[in-house]
Image: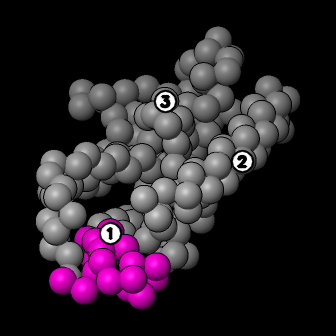
Amino acid sequence: EAMQDSAAWGSVRVVPDARQITDLMVRGKILYSDGEELQLHITAVDSRGYVWLDREYEGNASRYAYSATTRSTYDPFQAVYNTIANDLLQLQEELREEDRENVRLVTELLFARSFSPHAFDGYLGQNRKKQYVVLRLPAEEDPMLERVRSIRERDQLFIDTLQEYYVTFDAQMDGP
């Protein structure tokens, strides 16, 4: 929600696992949480395999964080989430435009290859660090690419539907 609220990321989605092909995958692991203190380990890796973020964050809830009026408005650890979102935004802004476009292109080619490995296998390679590099581009009017783009749009609509379920689940869990 902190990333979505910043309006700097386009669609931000919660997905059940890392198999989803996306421009930037942000993962978090709760290292410690007792309601007063929160420690997280956050990693963010783009579709090319470049690690943007790999660090720990921690925060303490205010003594007023769980009062009835505050709880319904703010998450006790919202400052931690905002810090993570701000760090990611700063890293995004440091990217050259060429690298931003490359991330989107690699994402599209990875998605295409997941549906048709034979047709899209030669477009991407990997360097020694196992990061993806674009070797060549398909023609813009390639019929197979057009079909894959259509599939990707439907896939994103499906994920958006799942997202609504996550939002509903989160709202139902807020009370408990």
Q: Disc 2 marks which residue?
A: 161
Q: Disc 1 marks which residue?
A: 81
Q: Amino acid at mark 3?
A: Arg
Q: Is residue 153 left or right of residue 13?
A: right
What residue span does the magenta drawing correspond to? Answer: 63-83
Question: Depth-wise, is mark 3 or mark 2 nearer the camera?
Answer: 2
Instruction: Please provide percent x and percent y for residue 106.
Output: 52, 40
Say few, some or many: other residues with alpha carbon within 10 Å of mark 2 (under 14 / 14 to 19 / 20 or more). Answer: few
Question: Depth-wise, is mark 1 or mark 3 nearer the camera?
Answer: 1
Q: Disc 3 marks which residue?
A: 19
> Between marks 3 and 2, how big is the CA–CA gap?
18 Å
**Helix, strand or loop for disc 3:** loop
Q: Is residue 164 visible?
A: yes
120 vs 35: above or below: above
> Between marks 1 and 3, how big is the CA–CA gap?
24 Å
Say few, some or many: other residues with alpha carbon within 10 Å of mark 3 (under 14 / 14 to 19 / 20 or more). Answer: few
Q: Is residue 90 visible?
A: no
